[in-house]
Amino acid sequence: MEKEKISIVIPAYNVEKYIEHCLESVIHQTYKNLQIILVDDGATDKTSEICDRYAKIDNRIEVIHKPNGGLADARNKGLERVNGEYIAFLDSDDYIYPTFYEELYDLLKKYEADIAECDFLRIDIDNKEKSEQLISEENAKRKIEEEVTNNIEALKLLYGIKLEPYVKKVVVWNKLYKREIYEKIRFPLGKLHEDEYTTYKALFNANKIISTNRVLHGYMQTKNSIMRQEIKQKRIDDTLDAYVQVVEFFKKQNLPELEMKARRRSLENCIELVGKIIQGNGTNAKMQVEEISNVYKKNGKQYIECLKNSEIDENENKIVQFLIKTYEKIEDGKVLDEKTWTHLQNMI
């Protein structure tokens, strides 16, 4: 009996150097019942030609050619075409282990879950040909564990006090979803940090999430990666706005503990942004630091009010007190600095 179909949405823009490595890892998956949707987002290099060539090689591949509209628009266009019972997203410069979809599908069935997720390994692009070997070696070091959570428990991990679970939870490309999870969710057009605008909604829509610490995804580190560039104003604006929307969502859902955690995470985000801005030493660094410090001051006051209605465990309280002291310093006229960022990094 054939297993259910998995629809994979792969946006592609000017990735002629990387996309073949990505597609080879997809078409040679041990799980065969796939709908592979390549969304050519107005590429100006040979990406379009490569997509069309692979569509001729493998009849599971469909190519959408569209004018450039950004990652969110490309993912949304792909979502319009899906016909599988399950959905996955993949970036066109990344790699997936041969058993990625089979293992996540089996976990969904084993636990009757709505979302399955795995760990990922950061791989330098120069080592991309060794991706399978590097992932196998990493898995050999690990005691494999599986964790089942409901939606609220997963969201508490997403906005918990440890950075590692946050990164694993927030990205979309290390997961397999039941199709209905994304029935009413679309990625925000024109925004960076698309995952931070959407993942919390997907987790909220799920009844059960299964997470494994097995590494099944290779996240390629390239010099042109958005996350490795100098901090631009657009990135600052969008990441700050994403947390505004998260907080409002939990407030509307009457989830005060999650609202408090999201507010706390938004303050941590301000400190992280400032630290990276100072390290980048851009031309607008001073102005950006002052702007974010003002945001911290405004949000800090709301956060302290929110704390009055929330229960906080001992570990989280250490960070809470640190954030309050930082708020008091800014209220006295100081600004966020790199020392504050270093202190926070040591705590999380």
Image (cartoon, rainbow, N blue to C red):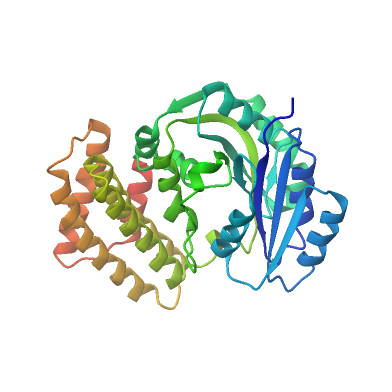
Position in image of residue 146 (x %, y %): 52, 24
Q: Residue furthest bottom?
A: 283
**Which x, y percent locates residue 94?**
67, 50
Q: Is residue 344 above or below residue 271?
A: above
Q: Position of residue 4 (x, y in %)?
A: 67, 34
In the image, residue 52 sits, relative to residue 138, either above or below, namely below
As drawn, 331 above or below 215 = below
Total tally of numbered discs in the picture = 0
Question: What's the residue at 59%, 40% (across, down)?
Answer: 120
Residue 286 on image: x %, y %? 34, 74
Give the left or right position of residue 2, taking residue 141 as reference.
Answer: right
Residue located at (70% from left, 30% from top): 3
Q: Taking the image as drawn, is residue 281 in sight?
A: no
Residue 290 appears in the picture as rendered: yes
Check the picture and name the quadrant holding the N terminus: top right
Nearer to the camera, 230 or 236: 236
Nearest the viewer among 257 and 114 is 114
Extreme right residue here? Answer: 57
- Residue nearest the observer in this picture, 62 or 345: 62
Residue under the point 61% across and 39% down: 85
Using residue 31 as the reference point, say whether residue 81 is left or right of it.
left
Screen quadrant of the C terminus: top left
Please report the residue visible at 39 percent of the width from the left and 73 percent of the height from the top: 285
Q: Nearer the viewer, residue 113 or 319?
A: 113
